[in-house]
Image (tube, rainbow, N blue to C red):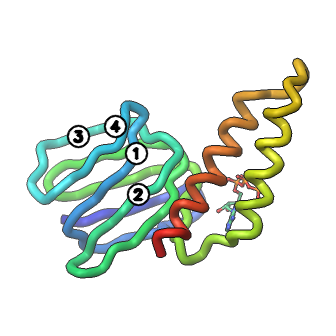
Amino acid sequence: MHLKIITHEKVVFDEDVDEIYTRGVDGEFGILPNHVPLMSALDIGVTKVVQGDQTKYFTTMGGVFQFKDNEAIILTTTAENGSDIDVTRAKEALARAKALLAERDANIDAKRAEAAMARALARLKATLNQ
Ligand code: ATP
């Protein structure tokens, strides 16, 4: 089966794969060849791709997953190959988000800080697995 991971800016991945594991808003799910057609809203998380004896990890930050006729498409806001992620930057983003959430200040946009924290955690998870 084939997988394309696309953002507004670029095609991040476009290759044949054997297995796909990703994170939908209702939880993680996996896709093997010949799966029935499926459409799911994606959460912020890590998408794992298996190609033979190789495994690759990508961050996928929301968007939509579509599978039909052995063609999978992930259309997402931001996606990065785990090997391209700047770990220091992700750790700094995580620390910033945690500090904001710890303030408990009414003026803080908690949802935004939580999303920033989820993005940073996904990035760190994707690099850990490289
Ligand atoms: P930061 O606060 O560090 O900017 P962010 O979560 O706000 O993180 P995004 O708005 O999700 O960043 O992404 C902006 C751009 O920066 C995107 O192109 C994204 O791929 C890239 N990017 C963000 N963090 C990293 C990282 N740790 N390593 C590599 N690229 C990153």
- Left or right: residue 119 versus residue 32 is right
Q: Are marks 4 and 2 in contact (CB under 8 Å)?
A: no
Graded by Cα atoms within 10 Å as few (under 14), some (14 to 19) or many (20 or more), the crowding at tag 4 reads some
Marker disc for residue 38: 3
Q: Is mark 1 within 8 Å of ligand 1?
A: no
Q: Which residue is mark 1?
A: 23
Q: Are marks 2 and 1 in contact (CB under 8 Å)?
A: yes
Label 4, label 3: how far apart the Cα atoms are:
7 Å
Marker disc for residue 40: 4
Graded by Cα atoms within 10 Å as few (under 14), some (14 to 19) or many (20 or more), the crowding at tag 1 reads many
State the SS at label 1. strand
Quadrant for the N terminus, please: bottom left
Res. 42 image quadrant? top left
Residue 57 in the image: x percent, y percent? 43, 67
Label 4, label 1: how far apart the Cα atoms are:
9 Å
Residue 70 in the image: x percent, y percent? 16, 58
Marker disc for residue 47: 2
- Left or right: residue 111 versus residue 44 is right
Q: Amino acid at mark 3?
A: Leu
